Image (cartoon, coloured by chain):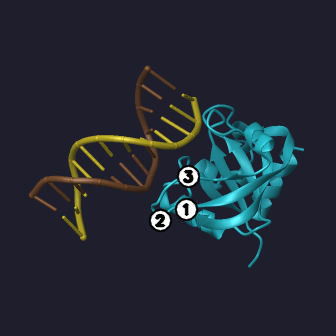
Chain colours: A cyan, B brown, C yellow
Amino acid sequence: MAKGHWLVKQEPTKYSWAHLVRDGRTYWDGVRNYQARNNLKGMKVGDPVLFYHSVEGLEVVGIAEVAREAYQDPSTADERWVVVDLVPVKALKKPVTLDAIKGVPALKDIPLLRQSRLSVMPLDKAAFDAIVKMGS
DNA sequence: GCCAACGTTGGC
DNA sequence: GCCAACGTTGGC
C-alpha cells in the first residue's frame, strides 16, 4: 500500500508538540469519532504525520511519524477504539498557521478547513508537501 | 465566552 | 427509521 500522509490535531494544553518531543514517543489515544478512528486504522509504520495545534496556536508545528499501527486503545476497554504510536521527526522551522493555509488556493479543500472538527485526517502528498515547504 | 457545525442519543 | 435534543469541538 502506498504511503499515506496525515494530519493530527491536538490542543497544546492537552498534549503539545513539545510534550511529544519530550516523551520521544506516545500513543495517540482519546479518539472517539468513527471517521478519525478509520483514519487511524489506515496509518502505516513510517507514514509522516503533521502535528497541528488547535484552539491555541492554530498552526502546524511539526512532523511526526507512525511508529506502530493501530491497536486497541489502552485507555478504554471498549474495543471499538484504537490508537497508533507516534514519534517526533522534526519541528517545522516556522509553524504554518491556519491563516496561512487558508491563503493557499491549492489547500482550500483539505479536511482541516472543510471539516474543522475532525481530529485525524488524511492529506494527499501535494498538500502535505506544500505545508512542509511553507514551514521550512 | 459565544456560537456554528456536526456527531450521538433516545423517544416515538 | 426519523428527527429533535443534547454534547463536544474548535474557530472567532
User: Which mark is drawn over residue A80?
Assistant: 2
Q: Are marks 2 and 1 on the same chain?
A: yes
User: Which mark is drawn over residue A92?
Assistant: none
For marks 2 and 3 on the same chain, the one whose residue lies earlier in the sequence: 2
Asked if the residue at tag 1 contacts the one at tag 2, i.e. Cβ–Cβ closer than 8 Å, the answer is: yes
- The kind of secondary structure element at disc 2 is loop
Label 3 marks a residue whose chain is A
Q: Which image quarter is the C terminus of chain A in?
A: top right
Label 1 marks a residue whose chain is A
Q: Give the residue type at disc 2.
A: Arg
Q: Which image quarter is the N terminus of chain A in?
A: bottom right
Q: Is residue A57 above or below residue A89?
A: above
Residue A37: image location, x then y, percent: 55, 62
- The kind of secondary structure element at disc 3 is loop
Q: Give the residue type at disc 3.
A: Leu
Seen in the image, is C7 located left or right of residue A8?
left
Residue B2: image location, x then y, percent: 41, 24
Label 2 marks a residue whose chain is A
Residue at (61%, 68%) from the top-left corner? Answer: A41
Disc 3 target residue = A118
Q: Is residue A82 above or below residue B11?
A: below
Residue at (59%, 52%) from the top-left corner? Answer: A29
Q: Quadrant of residue A120?
A: bottom right
CA neighbours of label 2 inside 10 A, class few (<14), some (14 to 19), many (20+): few
